[in-house]
Amino acid sequence: MNTKSRLIKKSSKTFLSTGLVLALLSALVLYFYTKQQLQNEVEEVLNSTEARVENALENHFIVKSLPPVIVVKEVETLLEKSLKDTTIYDPSQDEMELFRELSVFKHINGKNYQITVREMVVESEDFLFAIMISNITIFGLAFLFLFYFNTKKNIALWRPFFKNLEQMKSFSLVSNEPLELVDSDVLEFSELKNEITTLTKKVRADYENLKQFTEDISHEMQTPLAIIQAKLDNIINHQDISDKQFDHITSIQEDILRLKQLNKKVTTLTKIDNNQFINIGRINLTTLIQEKVESYNELHLASLILIENDTLEVSMDTYLAEILVNNLISNAVKYNINNQQISINTNKKSLHIFNAGDKAITNPELLFLRFYRESNGTKSTGLGLAIVKKICDLYKFKVSYHFEKEHHVFSVVFSD
């Protein structure tokens, strides 16, 4: 996974790396350029000295050698001119020193001479390194100075962007508090601020319209469903109907009940999506589960047992806590086989529900999707577990399913 870096940090790294590369390149260029210039100067001195010696010989002056700087001697044959670096003992320093040596052969006044002149280059190397160190020091100080002020300038320049980013992170559709965005003298940041303001206003307006539409539809559906239910009850209670008609009416009543449940669950999902459940309190889920277990057992709807390893308490909305428990237990009851006992285990951090089953669910990855049903034989709305998943996502709980020892197991691990 790629690690993320802050903008200022990343731009500073780029500035640092670029500056270091430029510093090294400039130091190398300066080193070789200065070295070449110093070498040219040494060679110019050598040529000048050799020319003076040659001129003195031509004018019949007596030229004595001054080892190791100047050496003049007669030779039998003339050789090629040579220019090289050589190490020679220097009596004045009592040590070996590096010299640049120019050796030429000349025929002067009927005699053959070898004129050798030398220039010490050790001081030149020291001078070269001194220039390099000075250049690196000056460049480094200037670089640090520029880096400091460049970073400060960038922080000031990007401050409106970062402040607006923090405001966007705290943006909520539920809250009516306006975004306090900061304007900037940078054109792009100013345009971004205006676009964010326009977009958030539109999002809030769309959200309010959608919320109002959902509430209106939910409310309006309740009335005709109640009227239909009342008329069907009236037909059953006050008119003679055949068994076939009774079966038809009963089927219609079941469909009406299912439609009511569907409407209620869709409304609940919408409210969760819109973050309308904001009343968070500390709830004893173990007590709530115990009440549901007793209700099912009293009505003989199923055989449930609660195994309490520890008290389970969570922070969430009371209404959503009841829906979470109801949906998980009703799902276990609905898909339990052979009326076997359903076990509910709780501890301090998790809840586990076991109900008997023939085989594992075919597509467990689809289990918590809206309107998904494992088989078409059931009249389930396909929203119960979707609501469970939505509630868990809202509070950062982790819900999961697995098949173990001929039992379906639904588990919820709570974050707090």
Image (tube, rainbow, N blue to C red):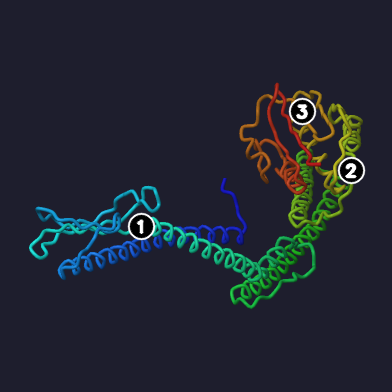
What secondary structure is marked by label 3? strand
What secondary structure is marked by label 2? strand
- Tell me if residue 29 comes above or below residue 374 in the rendering: below
Residue in view at x 30 percent, y 54 percent:
68
What amino acid does circle 2 point to? Answer: Ile
Q: Look at discs 1 and 2 and give the one toward the viewer.
A: 1
**Quadrant position of the C terminus in the picture:** top right
Say which residue label 1 marks. 121
Gap between marks 3 and 2, in whole Å?
A: 23 Å
What amino acid does circle 3 point to? Answer: Phe
Gap between marks 1 and 2, in whole Å?
A: 88 Å
Q: Look at discs 3 and 1 and give the one toward the viewer.
A: 1
What amino acid does circle 1 point to? Answer: Val
Say which residue label 3 marks. 354
- Tell me if residue 344 comes above or below residue 88 in the rendering: above
Tell me the number on the disc at residue 15: none
Say which residue label 2 marks. 283
